[in-house]
Image (tube, helix red, strand yellow):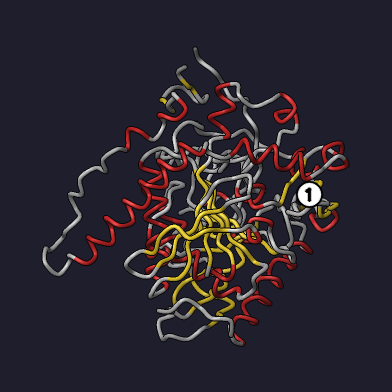
Amino acid sequence: MMLRIKRVPTVVSNYQKDEGEDAARRGGGCGRNCLQKCCIPGAKLPLYTFKRAEEIPGDNLGLTMVKSLYLLGFQWEDRMQRGLFRYDVTACETKVIPGRCGFMAQLNEGRHLKKRPTEFRVDKVLQPFDGNKFNFTKVGQEEVLFQFDASEDGEVHFFPDAPVDADSSPSVVAINVSPIEYGHVLLIPRILECLPQRIDRESFLLALYMAIEAGNPYFRLGYNSLGAFATINHLHFQAYYLAVPFPIEKAPTRKVTTLGDGVKISELFDYPVRGLVFEGGNTLQDLSNAVSDACIFLQDNNIPHNVLIADCGKRIFLLPQCYAEKQALGEVSSELLDTQVNPAVWEISGHMVLKRKKDYEEASEENAWRLLAEVSLSEERFEEVKALIFEACSYTLSEKEDEHLTQGAGDDKPPLEGTGSINKGRNCNMVSGTQECLVLQ
């Protein structure tokens, strides 16, 4: 039987609608001042360079962190004054839902009303980049707050007018024109390389550096894979400020294991979504590698997932999910589907972005819990995935320890045993098909 998930459109850029040849050639290029080859030559954008850190940051974040916080907020508010956002997110109603978890609800009707069709399949976590579809090189340069890169001299710098080096493909921080909260931005690693939405070690470490540089525990970064409600197949992380703890950050955890490089892995309990928490490590690189390797394993095995980077990069939540799969199987109630809430990283973390006034007025801890419980893997399936993630992390760590013995060790890494058992708990598998999510039953 073939089942289909209804398309939910999304909006990301002011320049996503009209890309025709009739765009005026004002001042050269395509006339839209975009980030593609037509407009990049000679372009200049602000540049923020950060100091590489070996150790995971402590509580004393220093003056440079305060400066970077001010910089992002100042640049974001400047774009607000220039009218680059689709709506004023600061006018959206927000409240804490009564209950022990402290779920938050926001009524964001503007985000709901201004959407564009999703342009990729929802049944495959890894899909090739398609330059004909919307991607972040098509946004206007005025939407970019600054380039973000490591410093060459080990010091933090800000250059207000730096050339864009197309050959080195800069990473950039840009506004999300359909924001969820104050300071909502996108970190787009190596933007001109046009990477698909998939985590790699280098890009994930860059996201950790951004969390460190912000230096504010209320500034979090999030990642959604394809199949877990990412809406653009161009590598990006999201981030914004919310001056209260997320419910997931307050959830109890229990330690599961400590890797050989000192990274401690715990799991959530007494929370509606099952997930893992990574922290510690001998170096920042160790922590980053452990999480990125786990994500790479999930990607390679077609398991949708979300990531939350919290506590200035010191704690990272990894959350495999199956809501889209349940939608395709017809296992999600019509009551939940009618809300049109797609639970991505922010919703899973406890910030419920609601699209209907009715749902906002009737928001309760029970309703939020019921929605998020549908996102979670079953206990049996989660245990299988968790065991294989540990195996993937341990395998990678062993490779690292053996590098001095064998040049290029790990290039021909054998497949993990047991990966075929991941979906046994549900008796179904994500399969290929058309642009709908197709599931065999």
Query: Is residue 239 toward the left or the right of residue 58 in the image?
Result: right
x, y percent for residue 279: 48, 66
Question: Which is more toward the observer, 376 or 8?
Answer: 376
Question: Which is more toward the observer, 420 or 343?
Answer: 420
Q: Eyeballing the image, is 206 above or below 349?
A: below
x, y percent for residue 249: 63, 61
Q: Which residue is mark 1?
A: 105
What is the count of numbered marks? Answer: 1
Name the residue rendered at 51%, 58% in the picture: 277
Query: Is residue 176 toward the left or the right of residue 99 in the image?
Result: left
Question: Which is more toward the observer, 92 or 328?
Answer: 328
- The residue tagged with tag 1: helix, strand or loop? strand
Name the residue rendered at 37%, 47% in the picture: 387
Q: Quadrant of residue 128?
A: top left
Query: Is residue 422 toward the left or the right of residue 374 in the image?
Result: left
Name the residue rendered at 63%, 50% in the picture: 270
Q: Quadrant of residue 367?
A: top right
Query: Is residue 194 toward the left or the right of residue 253 in the image?
Result: left
How many residues crowd mark 1 within 10 Å: few (<14), some (14–19), many (20+)?
Answer: many
x, y percent for residue 347: 67, 47
Name the residue rendered at 38%, 75% in the picture: 282
Q: Eyeballing the image, is 248 above or below 17?
A: below
The amino acid at mark 1 is Ala
x, y percent for residue 365: 77, 45
Q: Eyeballing the image, is 148 above or below 180?
A: below
